[in-house]
């Protein structure tokens, strides 16, 4: 399966693709264009095939390993038998370059990157190319997931001097680590419109020998320009920009790029965008009585539904692939990344709430005092689909015709003599179990495929695998199906159908499988996947059932049974490579994924996964003596955990994402030890990364990044949120949990430092715009006084968890004035249980509500 190139960047800060060569035009699906090289340079570089040419046929990998054999990174180990004399990033390589006066060839990638595999196979296994590299360069290989600081510095150069970036990233440096030429994937030989890797090496060698001083001067000039361009500082600004203005501009930019038919925010390739979806939900909450608010909600829900129905979701084994190569979310790039699973689990959990927001005529609903108002206790009538709050051009999420009322009159109403609610219900997003089922499926996949038995989470699964044992790996081979395979696995006749029908035919109809295959030749120019199919939902359950005269529940059961049989059959295929590296940052995101989803759905089992993940981080990725996080650890033999020596210390994103995970875990579990550890890690983060002069956080420690030409601040919410954006949220929550003014002051400085970036391109920082809004609103401190094991306490906690309230902290007060939280917030010891029952208080601006013991009353108050 071909990869489309990284999406062309409209402005710096948009999402980048992973494992992709740059160079193709938007919407192109030609693999030849996909594999065209991108070259960036601080000096003119001739492009073409005018140099001497030699066939560069790949040779068999050398049996003698290079020095990468001593590394732990799966990516570096993939290159351990290359004929290239690779060095890991470090002083040994730099000293050699300076001593021998050679340029450094830096190659950056990651172990599940398809085009990294291609370049390794075509060029780095090639004896002649290996000889060129060994004679004239000092070759350094870097795993971008181990050293995000190195990756970001040189990706900044590549993006600034070319049309974009991607991986593998190949950059040539001076011995002082300043870049002068860069690019992404290079084929081994020249083509009609693309330069080959061998030609690039020969020309750089010639330039270095004949024009080295010019190269050095230009490199210094480019580095100086990049320093000025990448500076993020408060300057003379004293306050951050207006949240209302930034919210409006960010929403309008997203609205302009929204795909009305299929959801998402690009033509192709199309990426999951959790940070954008989070922003849209928050925007809806603060504008829910406006047309823009309603549209923001629909944009987010429609995108999530189309993604979940598309081929980007693995319908057989669950989880989501990296991105879609087409507008329809149909044919994915098949690698699966941990950070996608973590963030999408949260997004789908947020899309699910216990009760849909009712229409105005249904505000008078009763609720038993101890029930917490579960969704199935309500007798609801949905608002007409032609509601004036929903623009007519909005794609409808329901198959019902315009104006039809969808009723649930058969659902029993609760007694009217208890807790009568005559006010607005709390803000809730959909109540559709479709979304909660997707979230649970994601977490099921992670637990099965990406989990270490000690509680940690692996990084990724590759896109490539052999169709059969002994064959060359192909992208997507593990995930695609032929009609014949499905027919052989599901031959059983379906009883009661209006025409002869097997279980296989039913499944193929529902998921769009055809004899010829449903993969377009334009997406498979090599013909590797002819006759193959990617499962994607083509019809609703209702339409599939109607087509064959079957009951909807029967169709659901038949499809689930069929998918399970496909899942069992797929177990016998060669599996994709597993990157068993464990990263603190991504594990922190996954702790959040399990904690938030478990809390929203009220599932202790999921919260326990989050607890085990946090325990793993503390046991294996935290140095007690220094208080620092380690960036990486690795799965060893027999279920052990190994570390590199010396250890790779954590970067800003490791601290920010782990702190977020711990705050989410505290709210889900109410175990204060996680909050205490989060506060300690935040102190360490401030000490190591805070810019006391310009505000905001640097991506790396000063010592760890010594020698790099730039020390950057992450200014993009992309596939992962910016660590500065996450830190802004964390600081606000820390202030809510402790009352310490220093956290709020730092948050203000951070938001002020990024003011110009937000003003210029707010859509590049939707997560930070959310933090800006939270800062300029009033944070709710929701305090539950009670025994954490008592039913009435759990009912109040679950009431809070079931409601979408992003700008809040949830605190459990047990009445002990010596407890950790009571020491942080002395006013907690003044709050009392009412009549010895679990009691809730909602506090804002240093004032608390009257005590509340009924979940219904708490719901009512939280909506005001």
Image: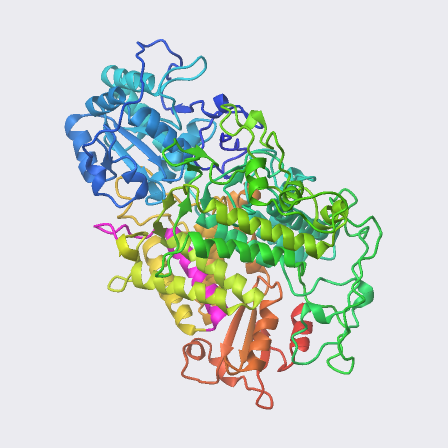
Say if residue 835 shows up in the picture. Answer: yes
Asked if residue 525 lies left or right of residue 167, the reply is right
Say above or below: 669 vs 696.
below
Please report the residue visible at 64 percent of the width from the left and 59 percent of the height from the top: 433
Q: Quadrant of the C terminus?
A: bottom right
Q: Nearer the viewer, residue 150 or 49?
A: 49
Q: Position of residue 778 (x, y in %)?
A: 59, 65
Say above or below: 466 vs 438.
above
- Residue 572: quadrant of the picture: top left
Can residue 318 be found in the magenta stretch? no
Q: Nearer the viewer, residue 208 or 748?
A: 208
Please report the residue visible at 32 percent of the width from the left and 55 percent of the height from the top: 688
Asked if residue 746 lies left or right of residue 556, the reply is left
Can residue 645 be found in the magenta stretch? yes
Q: Position of residue 50 (x, y in %)?
A: 36, 8
Q: Position of residue 32 (x, y in %)?
A: 48, 21
Say above or below: 595 vs 51.
below
Q: Nearer the viewer, residue 458 or 357?
A: 458
Tell how many labels: 0
Magenta residues, dominant SS class? helix
Q: How is colour applied across the structure in the image?
A: rainbow
Q: Position of residue 627 (x, y in %)?
A: 29, 62
- Residue 57: quadrant of the picture: top left
Say if residue 237 shows up in the picture. Answer: no
Residues rendered magenta in the picture: 643-670
Q: In the displayed image of the protein, which residue is found farthest to the right?
A: 403
Please report the residue visible at 57 percent of the width from the left and 49 percent of the height from the top: 563
Asked if residue 79 lies left or right of residue 595, the reply is left
Q: In the displayed image of the protein, which residue is found farthest to the left?
A: 99
- Residue 193: quadrant of the picture: top left
């Amino acid at each position: 399966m071909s990869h489309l190139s990284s999406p062309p960047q409209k402005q710096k800060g948009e999402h980048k693709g992973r494992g992709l060569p740059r160079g193709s035009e938007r919407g192109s699906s030609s693999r030849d264009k996909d594999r065209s090289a991108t070259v960036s340079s601080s000096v003119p570089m001739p492009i073409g095939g005018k140099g001497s040419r030699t066939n560069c046929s790949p040779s068999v990998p050398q049996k003698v390993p290079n020095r990468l054999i001593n590394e732990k990174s799966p990516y570096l180990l993939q290159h351990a038998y290359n004929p290239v004399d690779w060095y890991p990033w470090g002083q040994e390589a730099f000293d050699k370059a300076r001593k021998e006066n050679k340029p450094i060839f830096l190659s950056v990638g990651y172990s599940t990157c398809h085009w990294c595999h291609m370049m390794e196979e075509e060029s780095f296994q090639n004896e002649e190319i290996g000889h060129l590299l060994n004679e004239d360069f000092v070759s350094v290989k870097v795993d971008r997931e181990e050293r995000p600081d190195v990756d970001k510095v040189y990706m900044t150069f590549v993006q600034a001097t070319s049309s974009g970036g991607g991986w593998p990233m190949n950059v040539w440096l001076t011995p002082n680590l300043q870049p002068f030429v860069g690019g992404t994937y290079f084929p081994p030989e020249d083509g009609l419109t693309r330069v080959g890797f061998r030609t690039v090496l020969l020309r750089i060698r010639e330039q270095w020998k004949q024009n080295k001083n010019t190269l050095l001067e230009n490199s210094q000039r480019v580095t100086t320009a990049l320093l000025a361009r990448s500076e993020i500082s408060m300057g003379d600004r004293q306050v951050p920009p207006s949240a209302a203005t930034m919210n409006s501009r960010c929403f309008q930019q997203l609205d302009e790029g929204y795909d009305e038919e299929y959801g998402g925010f690009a033509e192709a390739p199309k990426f999951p965008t959790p940070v954008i979806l989070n922003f849209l939900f928050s925007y809806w909450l603060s504008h829910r009585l406006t047309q823009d608010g309603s549209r923001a909600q629909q944009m987010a829900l429609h995108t999530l539904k189309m993604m979940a129905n598309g081929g980007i979701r693995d319908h057989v084994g669950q989880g989501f692939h990296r991105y879609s190569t087409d507008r329809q979310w149909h044919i994915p790039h098949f690698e699966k990344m941990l950070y996608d699973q973590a963030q999408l689990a949260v997004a789908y959990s947020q899309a699910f709430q216990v009760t849909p927001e009712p229409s105005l005529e249904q505000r008078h609903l009763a609720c038993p005092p101890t029930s917490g108002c579960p969704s199935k206790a309500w007798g609801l009538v949905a608002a007409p689909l032609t509601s004036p709050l929903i623009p007519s051009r909005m794609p409808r999420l329901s198959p019902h015709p315009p104006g039809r009322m969808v009723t649930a009159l058969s659902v029993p109403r609760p007694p009217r003599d208890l807790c009568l609610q005559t006010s607005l219900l709390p803000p809730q997003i959909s109540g559709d179990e479709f979304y909660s089922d997707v979230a649970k499926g994601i977490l099921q996949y992670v637990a099965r495929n990406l989990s270490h038995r000690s509680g940690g989470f692996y990084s990724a699964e590759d896109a490539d695998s052999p169709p059969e044992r002994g064959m060359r790996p192909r992208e997507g081979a593990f995930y695609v199906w032929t009609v014949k395979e499905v027919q052989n696995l599901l031959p059983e006749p379906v009883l009661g159908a209006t025409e002869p029908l097997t279980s296989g035919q039913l499944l193929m109809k529902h998921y769009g499988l055809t004899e010829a295959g449903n993969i377009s030749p334009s997406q498979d120019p090599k013909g590797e996947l002819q006759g193959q199919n990617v499962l994607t939902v083509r019809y609703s359950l209702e339409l599939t059932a109607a087509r064959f005269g079957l009951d909807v529940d029967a169709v659901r059961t038949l499809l689930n049974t069929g998918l399970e049989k496909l899942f069992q059959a797929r177990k016998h295929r060669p599996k994709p490579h597993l990157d068993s590296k464990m990263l603190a940052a991504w594990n922190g995101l996954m702790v959040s994924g399990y904690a938030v989803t478990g809390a929203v759905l009220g599932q202790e089992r999921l919260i326990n996964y989050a607890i085990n993940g946090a325990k793993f981080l503390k046991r294996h990725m935290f140095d007690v003596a220094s208080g620092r996080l380690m960036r990486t650890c690795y799965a060893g033999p027999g279920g052990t955990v190994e570390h590199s020596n010396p250890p790779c210390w954590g970067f800003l994103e490791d601290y920010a994402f782990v702190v977020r995970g711990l705050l989410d875990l505290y709210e889900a579990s109410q175990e204060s030890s996680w909050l205490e550890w989060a506060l300690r890690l935040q102190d360490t983060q401030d000490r190591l990364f805070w810019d006391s002069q310009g505000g905001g956080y640097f991506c790396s420690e000063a010592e760890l990044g010594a020698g790099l030409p730039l020390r950057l601040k992450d200014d993009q919410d992309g596939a992962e949120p910016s660590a500065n954006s996450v830190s802004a949220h964390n600081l606000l929550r820390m202030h809510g949990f402790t009352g310490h003014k220093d956290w709020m002051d730092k948050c203000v400085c951070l938001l002020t430092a990024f003011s110009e970036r937000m003003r210029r391109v707010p859509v590049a920082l939707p997560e930070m715009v959310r933090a800006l809004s939270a800062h300029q609103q009033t944070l709710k401190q929701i305090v539950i006084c009670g025994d954490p094991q008592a039913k009435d306490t759990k009912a109040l906690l679950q009431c809070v968890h079931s409601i979408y309230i992003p700008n809040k902290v949830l605190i459990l007060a047990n009445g002990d004035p010596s407890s950790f939280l009571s020491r942080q917030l002395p006013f907690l010891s003044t709050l009392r249980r009412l009549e010895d029952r679990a009691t809730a208080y909602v506090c804002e601006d240093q004032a608390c509500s009257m005590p509340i013991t009924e979940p219904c009353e708490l719901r009512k108050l939280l909506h005001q």
